[in-house]
Image (cartoon, grey):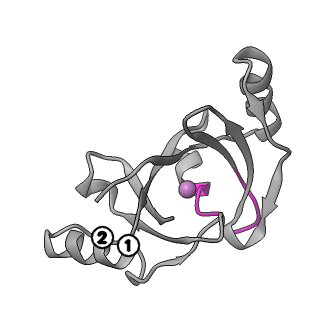
Amino acid sequence: MLGRVNHIAIAVPDLAAATAIYRDTLGARVSQAQALPEHGVTVVFVELPNTKVELLEPLGENSPIAAFLAKSPLGGMHHICYEVDDIIAARDRLKAGGARVLGDGEPRIGAHGKPVLFLHPKDFNGTLVELEQV
Ligand code: CO
């Protein structure tokens, strides 16, 4: 069911500082910052040969990463995103196995313009899992 790792998302309190760490300390290629108001984040993409890391900074009042950063003020890994071919088939299989899908269970359009779902961290070893149909 799972394909490639599409991205690993890291919530950060200071996007400029986090970008400098990846660009200058780690020597990675990084994008310009992009504000995604509909997702409540500003994002920088760290482009790696086999996947990407997304640095997420809260944007606006109801950012979905605000609570995470309140608990982990230094930042930390927020979620991992796996690619799937058929997100409805993946969802139905996971739900049949007892996994909890966040929200109303219907895919929504994610930050890359493709359908995504999030799975409850309590069902996946404490890790928030995103599925993206590619
Ligand atoms: Co994501």
Q: Which mark is residue 86?
A: 1
Residue that lies at the very extreme toward the right in this rendered image: 32
Which residues fall within the magenta stretch? Answer: 57-67
Q: Position of residue 49 (x, y in %)?
A: 61, 32
Q: At x 74% / y 23%, what residue is drawn?
A: 21
Q: At x 72% / y 73%, what residue is drawn?
A: 38
Q: Amino acid at mark 2?
A: Ala
| Beta carbon at label 2 within 8 Å of ligand 1 | no
In which quadrant is the N terminus drawn? bottom left
68 or 129, nearer to the observer: 129
Q: Residues within 10 Å of mark 2 (few under 14, many from 20)?
A: some
Q: Which mark is residue 108?
A: none
Mark 1 and mark 2 residues within 8 Å of each other at the beta carbon: yes
In the rendered view, tell whether residue 33 sits above or below residue 101.
above
Q: Which mark is residue 90?
A: 2
Ligand 1 rendered quadrant: bottom right
Q: Position of residue 37 (x, y in %)?
A: 77, 69
- Label 1: state its secondary structure: loop
Q: Residues within 10 Å of mark 1 (few under 14, many from 20)?
A: some
Queried whether the magenta region covers residue 64, the answer comes back as: yes
Residue 108 placement, left or right of 85: right
- Label 2: state its secondary structure: helix
Q: At x 15% / y 70%, what residue is drawn?
A: 98
Residue 100 placement, left or right of 108: left
Q: Is residue 79 among what the camera can see?
A: no
Q: Is residue 128 among what the camera can see?
A: yes
Count of number-bearing discs: 2
In the rendered view, tell whether residue 74 sits above or below residue 90.
above
